[in-house]
Structure formats: C-alpha cells, structure tokens
Image (cartoon, rainbow, N blue to C red):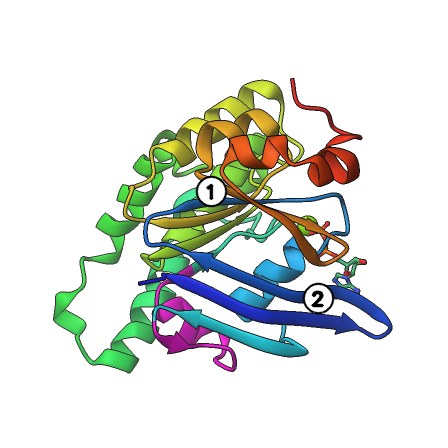
Amino acid sequence: MTRLNVEHLSKNFGGIAALVGVTLDVQPGERRAIIGPNGAGKSTLFNLIAGELPPSSGKIYLGERDITRLPIYERANLGLGHTFQRNNLFMGLTVFENVRLAVQHHQRVARRLFRAAHSFEPVTRASAALLEQVGLIEQRDQAVKTLAYGQQRALEVALALATNPQVVLLDEPTAGMSPAETGEMARLIEKLPRTLTMLIVEHDMDVIFSLAERITVLHYGQVISEGTPAEVRADPLVQEIYLGAVPFE
Ligand SMILES: Nc1ncnc2c1ncn2[C@@H]1O[C@H](COP(=O)(O)OP(=O)(O)O)[C@@H](O)[C@H]1O
Ligand SMILES: [Mg+2]
C-alpha cells in the first residue's frame, strides 16, 4: 500500500501556476527527494501536503485516507510531520521548552481526539528522547537564539518528530549550513528510523545521493522526471533543464 499519494495536485497563486497536476506515490519507509530549481514549487507541494495551504485542485491521501480537506492538526495526528524552509522556533525559549511545547500540544490534541490519556509517555521523557535523537541534549537549557544555526535546524527536525509522525516532510534541512553542519544534519537524517517515510527537499546533491532511494524532479510546478538516483542522473531532460546549472560530480 502507498503511504502517501498525491493525485493531479495543482496550486495557483493568482496568475502563477506554482504546481501543475503533480502525481506522487511514496511507499512506506521510502526516502524520497524532491529536487528542482528555485521557484519550481517544492515548498508549495509540502505546504499542500501538510495542509498549510489548500490546493486549487487534486487529491492527497495518507494511506487510504483522503486528507485533502483536513486541517493541519488533524493531518499531524494522522502521522504527518513537516519542517519549514524558514525557522519556525521560539527564539527566546530554551531548546527543551521548544520541544516540550510541541510534544505537549500534540499529546493534548491527541488526548482530546482519542481519549487515551494513559497510553502516552510523560512529556519530559519524550522531549528528552527527541533531543537525544537530534544531538541537542547537552544544549537543552540554552536559549534557542544562542544556538548555532545548524543546531537550530536540528531542533526543527526534533519539532517535526514531536508528533511521532509516520511521514515526515523536510524542507531544505541543510539550507544555509556550513559544510560541517550539512554533514551532521545528513548523518542525523540518515539515522532516523527506517520505518519513517520521508520526503526531503534538498539542494545538496551529496546529501540527496547518499539518502534518497528515489528522486522526483520538479520544474515550473511539473514533474519532469522520477526514478532512482542513477535514472534521474542519466535523464537527458534533467541534465538539460536542471543539472545544466548544477552539474553532478
Ligand atoms: N504564498 C504565496 N503567494 C504567492 N506566490 C507564491 C506563494 N508561495 C509560493 N509562491 C510562488 O510559487 C512558485 C513556487 O514557489 P515555491 O513552492 O516556494 O518554490 P521552491 O520551494 O521550489 O523554490 C514561485 O513562483 C513562488 O513565487
Ligand atoms: Mg522552497
């Protein structure tokens, strides 16, 4: 069964067609990279899947469930996590407080929806485990604004994982990072559970080729190529349109 399925998804912003009939099938546990030039519609695709924006047309399914019209929090409770291209953190709060708020919020909503208060781990333990997972446990009491940029991005991954998602959307997790920070983030992502289905927008080709099992190439809002890294790399259309500007090694 497909874990995440997008059918003929389109989004217009006024006269701009940001996404045009995009269809995607992502298998359970798959790690899928979405690449394409700036403005290709990658963030728009993630915003539609996560429910940040309504589509102009098309359908989105999580498993069998049609989630096209569900609000963000219901998608989160069905197992969808999302990081943003831009920082989405409480800068004045500590690292731990940021994670705790996310975990608490999710558990409160989940309790309301499912009335299963006793089946949840204490918030503190879950928050500490997330910080361990992203390598920020030693920084737990630091204000977020004092963290290095790369650490802030790692914290955002922790927040996306706070809802215990089955599918996670990572939008340029290494954007603006130094090469050392990029390497650390790639290792962090690599170590996430294999059961987690992942869609990742990423510019760093080394990160993509070490991580992704399949790659989808967007260009002007349309899928122009899809396949294994080797297939996409060999696609003449991709080479012409996209990789001309950013050649593979
Ligand atoms: N909220 C918005 N309002 C108007 N236009 C938008 C909005 N978000 C994105 N766009 C436009 O949609 C197109 C795709 O943008 P985006 O999805 O951010 O591309 P990418 O993430 O691939 O760089 C661009 O032309 C962008 O200017
Ligand atoms: Mg983007």
The magenta stretch spans residue 74: yes
Q: Residues within 10 Å of mark 2 (few under 14, many from 20)?
A: many
Which residue is nearer to you in this view: 219 or 92?
Answer: 219
State whether residue 44 is above or below residue 180.
below
Q: Judge from the rendering whether residue 135 lies leftward or rightward of residue 94; answer left or right.
A: left
Q: Judge from the rendering whether residue 53 lies leftward or rightward of residue 152; answer left or right.
A: right
Q: Judge from the rendering whether residue 114 lies leftward or rightward of residue 163; answer left or right.
A: left
SS at mark 1?
A: helix
Which numbered marker is on residue 20?
Answer: 2
Whole-percent x and y of residue 114?
Answer: 23, 79
Q: Which residue is mark 1?
A: 155
State whether residue 235 is above or below residue 187.
below
The picture quadrant where one finds residue 194 is: top left
Which residue is nearer to you in this view: 148 or 22?
Answer: 22
Task: Report the magenta residues as a range.
Answer: 64-80
Whole-percent x and y of residue 80?
Answer: 41, 62
Quadrant, the N terminus? bottom left
Which residue is nearer to you in this view: 100 or 53?
Answer: 53
SS at mark 2?
A: strand
Which numbered marker is on residue 209?
Answer: none
Quick check: marks 2 and 1 in contact, CB under 8 Å? Answer: no
At a point 79% along the width and 67% down the height, the residue shown is 17
Quadrant of the image where one finds ligand 1: bottom right
The magenta stretch spans residue 122: no
User: Which amino acid lies under the numbered mark 1 shown in the image of this protein?
Assistant: Leu
Q: Measure the C-alpha gap from mark 2 to mark 1.
A: 33 Å
Q: Judge from the rendering whether residue 115 lies leftward or rightward of residue 226; answer left or right.
A: left
User: Which amino acid lies under the numbered mark 2 shown in the image of this protein?
Assistant: Val
At a point 32% along the width and 44% down the height, the residue shown is 130
Quadrant, the C terminus? top right
